[in-house]
Image (cartoon, helix red, strand yellow):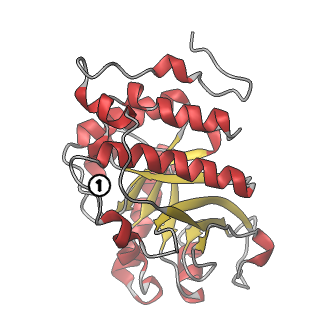
Amino acid sequence: MTQRDTCGNPAPDQYACHPASEHGACASCASGERLGFRFSYAYQPIVDIHTRDVYAHEALVRGVAGEPAPSVLANVTDDNRFRFDQACRIKAIKTAAKLGMQSRLSINFLPNAIYRPELCIRSTLEAARAHGFPIERIIFETVEGERISDAKWLTEVFREYQRIGFLTAIDDFGAGFAGLNLLADFQPDLIKLDMELIRGIDQSRSRQAIVRGTVGICRELGIEVIAEGVETPDECSALHDLGIRLMQGYLFSKPLFESYSQANSLTWPTGLAG
């Protein structure tokens, strides 16, 4: 039986990394070697338009002065991606806890940077325990634009995360990196529709048909759908009519650097029936 701490999280020592001689990659992600660059986070809300509340906040990497993500990601290499992935998890949880965030927290991860999910998860569990952040409020989603080199490997990672108690999400669904073949083998808790599908959906019958079909499939499989990149009230209304209640985008709030949005500070479209 998995041992758990007082917050209900699995004890980190249940997932201790093996030494370098046994698993070199795990030693990379667990080592204390410094990355050589610093970063911070901005948080953007994922909203529930039915309850008019914040469902989650996505942690978006930024430079220490709020510089955009590419300025940080340009420093990530094959040699440091293990350490960077682990450092991101710890930093996102630590900062969210320090801010007093009570919503779910969505963290992007690099699936190609994980050697053994059941072993390399230790630092995440340690951070959750140290900062009192329950793991059932943590969502792991594939990082935007990350090409998955092995879909079956991603499935293995996600299944282990679900077993531990994390929520799972597939980002950029419909962009070609993760699609229906993946859903046939694994059903995440959430999928995030690619923003290119969302852009101008109120004026596009083809986009509406694709999203309507995807929503129907996900409903049958018990998967929640998030529409990301929502920028206009008309897009929001069209998505609502298609059965989507979880949305993310500039219509509601831009990412806030080292801060997060409260429900009463967001822009809520009018005229939507619950």
Q: Establish if 257 lies above or below 169.
A: below
Rendered location of residue 23, percent (x, y): 25, 23
Graded by Cα atoms within 10 Å as few (under 14), some (14 to 19) or many (20 or more), the crowding at tag 1 reads: some
Q: Nearer the viewer, residue 67 or 174?
A: 67
Q: Establish if 272 lies above or below 24.
A: below
Task: Identify the image quadrant of residue 31.
Answer: top left
State which quarter of the image contains the C terminus. bottom right
Q: Is residue 161 visible?
A: yes
The residue pinned by badge 1 equals 179
Residue shown at 75% from the left, 64% from the top: 51
Rendered location of residue 164, percent (x, y): 52, 28
Tell me: 13 left or right of 45.
Answer: left
Residue shown at 58% from the left, 78% from the top: 254
Rendered location of residue 154, percent (x, y): 31, 40
Tell me: 164 left or right of 155.
Answer: right
Rendered location of residue 75, percent (x, y): 29, 62
Task: Identify the image quadrant of residue 261.
Answer: bottom right
Q: Is residue 220 visible?
A: no
Residue shown at 70% from the left, 82% from the top: 267
State which quarter of the image contains the N terminus. top right
Instruction: Give the residue furthest to the right.
Output: 264
Tell me: 168 left or right of 36.
Answer: right
Q: Label 1 sits on what residue type?
A: Gly
